[in-house]
Image (cartoon, rainbow, N blue to C red):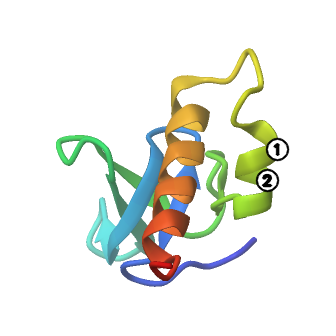
Amino acid sequence: MDEYGKNEILFSEAIGVCRVSEILNLSSNKKDYIRYYLLISVFDRNKSSYIPVSSHHVLLRPLITVEEAHNRENAENLSMQEKQEIEYVLQKDRKEQPDV
């Protein structure tokens, strides 16, 4: 299972494209601490999710590549989160392209 760093942008099946805002140690009994990612949605800053760093059941993965985004941008049956991921990746790529 991959570990992600603070401020890394990734895809979560729970909230879509998100940023790792914090990595926290949380405990329910003051003895056993569990490390959690605090994920904040890139598209809706009011959406957040606490996901355990290890043993989580939510899909967390790096964003798709620009090539994958181009290949999938006209695909049917994409979820809203997948569409936003494609949009985010393509917009980021456009911003990184030098003006000609």
Looking at the picture, does residue 96 appear above or below residue 20?
Answer: below
3 shown above or below 75: below
Quarter residue 30 falls in = bottom left
Vertical position of residue 96 compared to residue 76: above or below: below
Percent position (x, y) of residue 99?
Answer: 45, 78
Q: Which mark is residue 68?
A: 2
- Image coordinates of residue 98 in percent, x first then y, are 49, 82
The residue under the point 17% across, 42% down is 46
Q: Amino acid at mark 2?
A: Glu
Task: Compute the Cα span from label 2 to label 1.
Answer: 5 Å
Relative to 39, is 52 on the left or the right? right
Residue placed at 34% from the left, 76% from the top?
A: 31
Q: Amino acid at mark 1?
A: Asn
Contact? badges 2 and 1 (CB < 8 Å): yes
Q: Nearer the viewer, residue 22 or 33?
A: 22
Query: Element type at marker 1?
Result: helix
Q: Which residue is mark 1?
A: 71
Left or right, residue 11 beside residue 49 = right
Indicate the position of residue 39 as horizontal and vertical percent values: 37, 58
